[in-house]
Image (cartoon, helix red, strand yellow):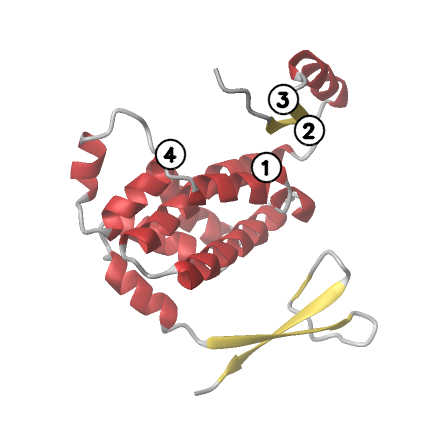
Amino acid sequence: MRCVVVAMVVASKDKNLASATQQLLASQNLRIITSSDVTGVEIAGALKNVLAIAAGIVEGMNLGNNCMAALVAQGCSEIRWLATKMGAKSATITGLSGSGDIMLTCFVNLSRNRTVGVRLGSGEKLDDILNSMNQVAEGVSTAGAVIALAQKYNVKMPVLTAVARIIDNELTPEKAVFELMSLPQIFYLKCRLKKCKLGLGQDQDGLALVTKEVKS
């Protein structure tokens, strides 16, 4: 058997429990990272499956590497926006249980959710895809929660909600691409909070994020 090196996250609000689990599971080939941000780990773990479907659609439609990078970057931001609104830490979403898991699920061919997306992007029907699989693609059922959460927490999530609409047969992959590319052009300006009071949000570095639509 080939020896591989793996890292994973154990999340619990009980630090003693997380530490005990870390000591129980850790080995020379398995690195365990503990986290108290249960919300962040759960949200990232659930929504990365939806994002992986989107990444698979891009692959199935042969939209190219640049499109793939842009889509996954946008999806990561959407997950972070929602997670932080729900009380999660931004660092969790950019860490192993966030970005790390997202990269694995979106870019590796063994990903069940990515496979569903590839086949959707290639023109297959969702029912046919699911009936032919002997494994569960969690992102299919999770997608329905995206729209509800986005509305509840007033977060714009165009990529992930587009996946939900494709799953619900409200939107074709081609139409989803058209709608996403038709969104208003945005430019981002960062300025220190002490000098700027127009920020619509705040990032980890204490910078205000000011967005403005670019009129074409």
Taking the image as shown, residue 8 lies to the left or right of residue 196, namely left
Distance between mark 3 and mark 2 Cα atoms: 10 Å
Q: In x, y percent, where is residue 55?
A: 39, 50
Reading the image, the residue beneath label 1 is 97
Q: Of discs 2 and 4, which sits in the foreground?
A: 4
Q: Which kind of residue does numbered mark 3 sit on?
A: Leu
Q: In x, y percent, where is residue 35?
A: 69, 31
Q: Is residue 115 above or below residue 73?
A: above
Reading the image, the residue beneath label 4 is 110
Reading the image, the residue beneath label 2 is 33
Kindly check if marks 1 and 2 are in contact, taking CB atoms under 8 A apart as contact: yes
Q: Is residue 37 above or below residue 86?
A: above
Q: Of discs 3 and 2, which sits in the foreground?
A: 3
Reading the image, the residue beneath label 3 is 30
**Residue found 63% across the figure and 32% down from its top:** 38
**Residue found 52% across the figure and 79% down from its top:** 213
Q: Secondary structure at mark 2?
A: strand
Q: Which kind of residue does numbered mark 2 sit on?
A: Ile
Q: Of discs 1 and 3, which sits in the foreground?
A: 3
In the rendered image, the residue lying farthest to the top is 24
Q: Of discs 4 and 1, which sits in the foreground?
A: 4
The answer to which of 10 and 142 lies nearer the viewer is: 10
Distance between mark 1 and mark 3 Cα atoms: 15 Å
Q: Is residue 192 above or below residue 51?
A: below
Quarter occupied by residue 125: top left
Quarter occupied by residue 208: bottom right
Earlier-in-chain disc, 1 versus 3: 3
Distance between mark 4 and mark 1 Cα atoms: 18 Å
Taking the image as shown, residue 18 lies to the left or right of residue 117, namely right
- Badge 3: residue crowd in 10 Å (few <14, some 14–19, many ≥20): some
